[in-house]
Image (cartoon, rainbow, N blue to C red):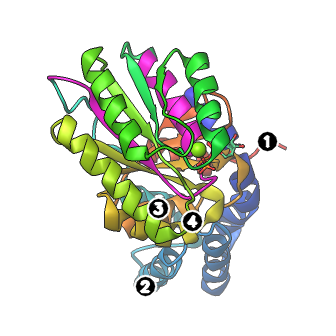
Amino acid sequence: MVFSKVQQGLTRTRNKIGHLLRSLSSDTSLEDTIDNLEELLFTADVGPLASELLEKAEAQLKSGALASAADIPQWLREELAQVLLGPSGEPLPKLNLDGPTVILVAGVNGAGKTTSIAKLCHWLSEQGNTVMVGACDTFRAAAVKQLQVWCERTGAQCIAGQPQSDPAAVAHDAAQAAIAQNIDYLIIDTAGRLHNQKNLMAELNKVSRVLDRIIPSAPHHSLLVIDATTGQNAIQQAKLFGECVPISGIVLSKLDGTAKGGATLSISKQLSLPVLFIGLGEGKGDLEVFNPSQFIDALFTPVQQ
Ligand SMILES: Nc1nc2c(ncn2[C@@H]2O[C@H](COP(=O)(O)OP(=O)(O)OP(=O)(O)O)[C@@H](O)[C@H]2O)c(=O)[nH]1
Ligand SMILES: [Mg+2]
């Protein structure tokens, strides 16, 4: 059931690389095989990982460690499984046993932060947790409203300030409210765009420091939402955000809207960060805990014609 949802979400990526995968198994000459593998890896947008895998395949075919082209698909699956980093255990463990566990959510504008927060509210409350959200994107007028609507739909409480108010002040109020009401998880929405990037990063840092002052070691999880359609640009974004808050995991949104699902592979490898969740649509239920082997199985499942 869940598996088919991931499969379905990856339809575009599977469509794009499926025929290449099949042509791999039917090739005979070494040259053709390497050529096709190269096309496949670049089409799948796996980034710098492509050259690494290609060199390895070539060496193994030449040495005989890989007997024939027909062995390549299985070999590729195994190689990719080693590259993908998923959550080790629970994706968002309750790290504060005496009070709210705080999740800070960051990312560039339009990445899917607010939608992913709605999905996380749904996911966490389905597991029996109480959830509160701090509307710290006070920069964009409509942002608070959007979050409030989602909170109504998911049953989470929303703490908001006045338009244009200091996001750190909202974070402060939200943290105090979460303690007072003995909430299990407090999720902090943040702005994706400010007047300039320096301000954005400074603000994120300030929100994070305020949270830590009120709730020990908060934020306990700092998630970076990456739009899967941005491909390799995501690496640069993650580095920038990582400089002001230590990112603990990635939420990869919009995998359903891209044929570049392969970018996932290089994102977790290049950042050495786990992908904790994947977003597969715009509804509150369109979020899955990232499972690398399930993801690879889905990627290698041909689209039924
Ligand atoms: N298809 C699809 N669309 C998504 C997904 N996640 C988010 N979106 C859409 O992407 C758009 C932007 O999402 P938001 O959640 O508003 O993004 P944001 O990062 O909060 O944006 P800002 O607040 O402007 O920084 C919306 O139209 C969402 O419906 C997903 O997993 N799949
Ligand atoms: Mg938003």
SS state under label 4:
loop
> Along the horizontal axis of the image, is 204 left or right of 234?
left
Please provide the residue range marked out in magenta: 98-125
> Along the horizontal axis of the image, is 20 left or right of 294?
right
Nearest-to-viewer mark from 1 and 3: 3
The location of residue 2, given as percent across then percent down, is 56, 28
**Mark 3 = which residue?**
200
Identify the residue shown where x is 62% and y is 79%. 38
- Looking at the picture, tell me which residue is in the foreground, 199 or 132: 199
Q: Earlier in the sequence, mark 2 or mark 1?
A: 2
**Mark 2 = which residue?**
59
Quick check: is 250 in the magenta stretch?
Answer: no
* Tag of residue 304: 1
For label 4, being within 8 Å of ligand 1 is answered: no
Q: Earlier in the sequence, mark 1 or mark 3?
A: 3
Q: Earlier in the sequence, mark 4 or mark 3?
A: 4
> Along the horizontal axis of the image, is 83 left or right of 44?
left
* Tag of residue 195: 4
Nearest-to-viewer mark from 4 and 1: 4
